[in-house]
Amino acid sequence: MSSQRPYVRSMDGWWTRNAYYMRYMAREVTAVFVAAYAVVLLVGVVRLSQGEAAFNGWLQALKSPLSLVFHLVLLATFVYHTWSWFNIMPITMPVMFVGGKRVQPRTITATGLVAAVIACAAVFFFVRGTQP
Amino acid sequence: MADAEKIMEIEVLRYRPEQEQEPVLQTYKVPFTDDTSVLQGLQYIKDYLDGTLSFRWSCRMAICGSCGMMIDGKPKLSCKTFLRDYYPGKLRVEALAHFPVERDLMVTIKDYVKRLEGIKPYLIPKQARTLDEGEYLQTPQQRDRYMQFSACINCMLCYAACPQYGVNPKFIGSGHMALLHRYNADSRDGGSDERMGPVNEEDGVWGCTAIGYCSVVCPKQVDPAHAINMYKAKSSLNYFTRFVAPKDADK
Amino acid sequence: MKRSNEPIFWSLFGAGGMLAALIGPALVFITGIAVPFALMNPDTMSYTHMLAFSQHWAGKCFAFAVIALFMWHAAHRIAILLHDFGVHAVALVKFGCYGFAFLCTVIAGYALLTLGG
């Protein structure tokens, strides 16, 4: 049977079509905040290389209310990144067996989340331990 | 009472290329009971209300993969979806998303079939084997490595779920990757290297952005999202080590 | 069709994403909230302390890794995001995103190297 005139439907705005796609977009948008934080750190490093006065300017900016709100938003998105990262991670890994049983995705996610908690705690205590 | 007759309004996106430029919605009133599937609803329309309605179906029991369509915007098998779950109200039925509409609820599937042939979906033995060597032996764990991926019924719901496929019809898609993996992971098979060509291309695994909706809609729990994303690491490893270990070079 | 070069960018995306997932929240909390608002000793990020940190090879590597990998992670995801939003100039988007990440990588490397130590 030959196709007379197949009709191709538009893909415009596809991500608004269901909640699942919207959640995917929310997950991807966290990247903007990761970039924003990297830029903040980059500016800090550049200011550091420009001397004490320049660096203190950067430090002062971090103490503004705008910076606080910005970092609270960043914190929320980074936590969401951690959560969504380890939730998606199992699908990128090969099928694994431990003791004859199939390793479940939720085991991988839980391990990752625990590792993140431990890593964050380690960073926090390391910084606290090296305080001047 | 369980058998009291109720009426469901089924809104179908019609498309008859010989008579219209663009698809149009047409509503039908269909009586149903507790066990009436959407497929049975469509069959009622065709038998009693409008014989011109075209749609694909075969087994009526979610194993042939013929009756995939969009039901209230979600890719489902019409034989496995029940009118009782949409009552009261209207039900919108459209042809499977991301494929060109051929007529009414039928989509053009020739590209899908062609690409399926391209992934070599058959066992390529590691070594030639004679009949008197007997059958292959496989442990339950060896079978578990590929079993779920062999459950694919080629219903294409995962393609209807995937917007990356919708935007780029050349994308290999998770369904074909699940089948490709079914053979790669089979202990009897030795054809992994041969199958990597299409996988490594831009329209291979790299068209996937890990949305994951494909696995949500799969009626057979194949988990195609897992299959395709597994190959990103495999393709990357091969990319970086191919000059170091020539035997793994893509063909 | 030829083999894709995506593995390069996907691997950088993965490394940056993993790093961000593991220690990102702690870093944001410390540098953006705890230290500036004295929940931790404010001198933790003083000029002298940060200079000493960045002059040590480990400090340099850490700062470079965080900035560069976070940027490459974000660049890959943002390039895909723009494609998903319907921006069709794929080559331009990729050049812009990865180009910006590359620029930030170079600036970070240069700044950290000129800090001495």
Image (tube, coloured by chain):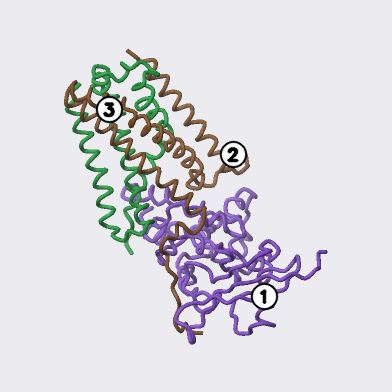
The furthest residue to the top? A132
Q: Quadrant of the N terminus of chain B?
A: bottom right
Crowd class of label 1 (few under 14; some 14 to 19; many from 20; radius 10 Å): some
Residue at disc 1, secondary structure: strand
Q: CA distance from mark 3 to mark 1?
A: 66 Å
User: The numbered mark 2 sits on a residue in which chain?
Assistant: A
Q: Which residue is mark 3?
A: A61
Chain drawn purple in the picture = B
- Kind of residue at disc 3: Ala
Q: Which residue is mark 1?
A: B29
Dot label at residue A6: none
Nearest the viewer among C18 and B73 is B73
Picture layout, residue B196 above or below residue B32: above
Which mark's residue is nearer the viewer, 3 or 2?
3
Residue at disc 3, secondary structure: helix
x and y percentages locating residue B63 in the rendered image? 65, 66
User: Is disc 1 in contact with disc 2, using a CB cutoff of under 8 Å?
Assistant: no
User: The numbered mark 3 sits on a residue in which chain?
Assistant: A
Picture layout, residue B124 above or below residue C115: below
Chain drawn green in the picture = C
